[in-house]
Every structure is written in structure tokens, then in C-alpha cells.
Image (spheres, rainbow, N blue to C red):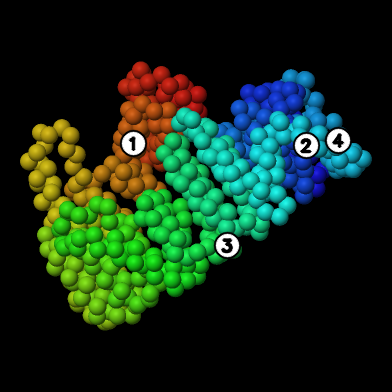
Amino acid sequence: MSTADLRSLLTTGALLKLAGEAAFARGAGYHRGGRVISLAEADGVLTAEVAGTEDYHVRIWSDAGRVGFDCDCPVGIELRFCKHCVAAALEWTDADTAAPPDHAHPTPKPRRGSDRKEAVHAFLAGQSKEALMEMLLEHAAESRRLRTRLELRAAAGATGPTSPARFRRAVDAAFRTREFVDYERAPSYARRILDVIGELRPLLDTAPAALVELVEHAAVCAVRAVEDVDDSDGYFSEIFEAIGDLHLEACKRARPDPIPLARRLFERALRDEYGVLAGVEAYAEVLGPSGLAEYRALAEAEWEKVPPLGPGDREGRSGRFKITEIMEALACLEGGVETWVEVKRRDLSSSYQFLKIAERYRDAGDPAQAVDWAEKGLAAFPATPDGRLRTFLAGVHQDQGRHDEALELVWAELSDRPDLDEYRQLKEHADRAGVWPQWRERALALVRERADAENARRAARAGVAWYDSSGYSTLVRILLWERRVEEAWSMAREGGCSESLWFELARKREAEHPGDAIPIYRRRIEAAVSGGSNRGYEDAVRLLSRLSELYTRAGRTPSDFAEYLAALRNMFRRKRNFIKLLGASPLA
């Protein structure tokens, strides 16, 4: 992408369209006010720093002939072309922003970016060292990011860190919140932290041992700080990852004493709910035999405090997750499924624990043990059998050619939970055994029988206003999945179904049966308007357009549709936004 091509995309008219009048006007004011404090273009990508509430970083480029952009301000992170992007683009093109947007000429004043860069390069080359230092210090006074970078690089010195305390203060300052960091300030707060972490990285070469200590301190700061930040967009995930990666790399370079390192890693793994540092597997090489032995001894001492749990036990379940995770990691390092199972069987309070053990044996190529543990799990919870255990066990039986046993298991699951997912599972297993037709008939009869019983119970409670019968919804859903639309329609007419299924049926049948679809569309329209939201009004008007076509194809006269439309207007005459939207539509 050439500079000329990028410039052609950043005309005043294009910027106005991208940003809208309000953001364009504010961005133009930023441009005129000198808020663009750094600007560069390289390989077709424009980068800038724009001073606002914080110093925001902008990038603009061409993306398949369109303007690509990002800015780390609150508006920019929502993927909107913000005022900072406008200011950067105007600064680069040197467009004439004095004229009102309506009269702005679409072509900015020509000025080649490469000429500007060469001019700046020539200017700097002719300056003395003292003059360059003065300019750099002046800019650093205006840019916190540059000032921090220069201070930390000065602290690193030429051959090693001359001031480790300065790095620690920088870490503390980066994480300091003073007050709760809300959603809008979270991006700049996170960027500040990542900037400082990035400045620690050169210490990998000059002082890795000092870096280990600094990054561990940063991990502590991060865990404390996350509680004071609205991290809805997950910025701390990137911060935690950056800290964890840097610590591991620093340990590989520094090779610290493995015994103290093992103790610190264990303590963090046990107490840090966010898992900032990697697990023991990642540090195995750094720890070596002596470090791993120390880590294991600490873990086993803690593990002894954890009581074993049997099926249904509730007491003692809290506070054991982290040490269990640590013991599982150590078992994986040791290798062999039995060591791992010994850890897992300490907690058999839920059927899910049995499932995880069964899966592990299956993956290890031991189907007999897999079946044994799955059957133990089902036997341990006879009143509330876990469908996942049944599904797992049925799959193992099928792989061994034991089709009848597999089918009985999935049939039991369908009997307990007669729904589409269980029906599909039954079909999958019956198809593998080549016996689907007879099982299908049996399954549909079961689903219908359960629906009739449920409808009878609901009819007995018809006086309860909040109770809404779904009728044959499951049966209809199954038949639609099988693409038996007419059978589904018959079942819906016989036993009823949910409104969403009625609408799905109408859409699938309207081509050949437009008259049947009309009352369903009308109910859908009236429900959408009754909801009272603008989105609902828009949906209703869109469906009315479709309904008009259905009236015509069903042989109804134009006056029939007009009569319904008039009745609808009268019914919802107090829904002003709907009436206004309807009036602006072609239906008016």
C-alpha cells in the first residue's frame, strides 16, 4: 500500500463519513489545537499519539481499499472511528479544516509524507547531541509514556541495572489505582502497565536474576489491582500472560536457586486464584530434581490436609481446588494414569469426577477400567443418573460392538429427558446398529406419551395464569429436525406447540400454504409490538410487509389486508414510535 493510496482514502469527505459530524468536528479541533503530539508513517501504516484525557495511540492503514484503524480510547475500542483518528488523519494530510464539513473540498492539500519524513530526518541529522537531548527531554515532559521509558532505560544502565529500586517503583506506579478504575479508563490503565512490563524485558540480557524478583513483585501487584478495575473486556488476561511469560523466561536465563524458587512457586500456585505464573510443568527444567522434590514435598504435606470425599459428600469440598490442581500437575509430570487417578479419587462427591476418571482410562487405552468407573458413577447416584456418564458408557460399548447395551443406555437417557438432543443420540447409536426404524417408532411414541401426560397435568392447572402449555413442542421439534414438515404441522395442530415453533412451521409451509401462515404471522406481529421496544416495532413492520405478500398469494383482496392494518393501528394507537415507523413504511 503506497502513501498516495492511503492519502486518497483520507479525504475530508471520507473522514466525515467515517466519524460522523460530531466526532469530525471534535477531531478537527484537536488537530488545530496541536493535540497530535507524535506522528509517523511507515509501510503504509500511519501511527500517532493524540493527547486527550490520556495519551491515546492511533493506527490507520488501508484494508482492501477501505480505511482500517484502531485507537485505544473508549470509543476506539468499540471499533468506531473516533476524534483521535480524525485528528491524526487531518494532521497527516494537512487538510483544510476551517471550512464547514458540508463545503469541504474532497481533496486535501497535496503534501507527500515521504518528503516530510526526509525533511525531519535531515533536520535531526544536522542537530548537535545537546540539541537532540533537549528536544527529547522536552517531549518526555509532555509524554508520560516516553518519560517512563527513558527513566527505566536509564535505570538499566549500560552493563546491568544500576537502580533495581527504580524499576520496582515504576511497577508500583503502573499498578497504582488510588480509586476504582472504571470501564472507560481501563484501556489506558492496562496500556500503562503493559508499557512498564515491556520495559522490563531488556533485563533478560543484562540482569535476569533481578528481573525474576521484579516480575514476582509485579505478579503480586497485578492480583491486588484487578479487584479495583472494571475489567469487563479482559485486559488483565493479557497482563497476567505477559507477567507469566516474562517470569518463566527470566528463570530460564537466571537459573535461580531451585529450592527457594520451588517454595515461592508453590506458594503462588496455592494462593493465587488467577494463576498469573505458569504451573509446575512449565518450570520442571528450571527446578531440576532438587527443586521438583521440594515442590512435591510441600504439595504432599498440604494434600494430607485434604479429606477424601465419597458420593454425595458436601462438607470439605471448599478450599481444595488449587491443591488438587497442583497434585494433578505433579501426577502428569510423573506420567502414568494410575498416579493421576489416585489424585482424582480423593474427591468422588459428584458423578462428574467418575466421568473424568473414566475418560482418562479410555484415552490411555484401557476400556475395561473406563467402563468400570463409568458404571461405578451411575451406581453411586441411582436417583440422579448423570446423562454424560450414560453417553460416555454408550460410546465405549458401541466401540466394542456391544450395540444392545449402548442402546439401552441412551434409551434410559431419552426416557428421563425426552428432548431432541437425546432423540438424536438414540438415532446415532441405532444407525450404527442398523436398527433405527423400530427404535424411531418407539421413541416417537414415548415422546408423545410424555407430552400427553404433561398436557393433562397442565389442563388440570388451567386456572394458573402464568402456566403456558407447550403442547407437542418436543415432538414438533423432532419432526422438523427430520424435515418431516407436514407431520410436524399435524402434530402442532393436534397438540399445540410453542409460538417460536409455530412461526418456524409457518415459514417452512408458507410457499405452498400461505393461508395457514397468515394467522401465525399476525400473532407474531402483535406480540412484537406488544413488547414495546423499537427493535420489536422494526420486526413487526418487516413482518407486515411479508404478511401483505401472503394475503395476495392466499387470494385475499387488498381491502382484507388494509382492514387488518387499520385494526392493528387502532389496537396499538398509543405505541407512538410504532405508528410513526409504520407511517414511514411503504405499507402506509
- Image: 186 above or below 431: above
Disc 3 on helix, strand or loop? helix
At 36% from the left edge and 26% from the top edge, which residue is drawn?
532
Dot 3: few (<14), some (14–19), or many (≥20) neighbours within 10 Å? some
* Contact? badges 2 and 3 (CB < 8 Å): no
State how far apart marks 1 and 2 are (Cα). Answer: 66 Å
Residue flagged by tag 1: what amino acid is it? Arg
- Tell me residue 210's x, y (percent): 58, 54
Badge number at residue 131? 4
- Tell me residue 510's x, y (percent): 37, 46
Dot 4: few (<14), some (14–19), or many (≥20) neighbours within 10 Å? few
- Image: 151 above or below 258: above
Is residue 525 or residue 278 the one in the foreground? Answer: 278
**Location of mark 2 (residue):** 136
**Location of mark 1 (residue):** 524
Disc 2 on helix, strand or loop? helix
Mark closest to the chain's N terminus, 1 or 3? 3
State how far apart marks 2 and 3 are (Cα). Answer: 34 Å
Mark closest to the chain's N terminus, 1 or 2? 2
Residue flagged by tag 4: what amino acid is it? Ala
State which quadrant residue 262 falls in.
bottom left
**Location of mark 3 (residue):** 254
Badge number at residue 120? none
Mark closest to the chain's N terminus, 4 or 3? 4
State how far apart marks 2 and 4 are (Cα). Answer: 9 Å
At 77% from the left edge and 20% from the top edge, which residue is drawn?
99
State how far apart marks 4 and 3 are (Cα). Answer: 39 Å
Residue flagged by tag 2: what amino acid is it? Leu
State how far apart marks 1 and 4 are (Cα). Answer: 74 Å
Disc 4 on helix, strand or loop? helix
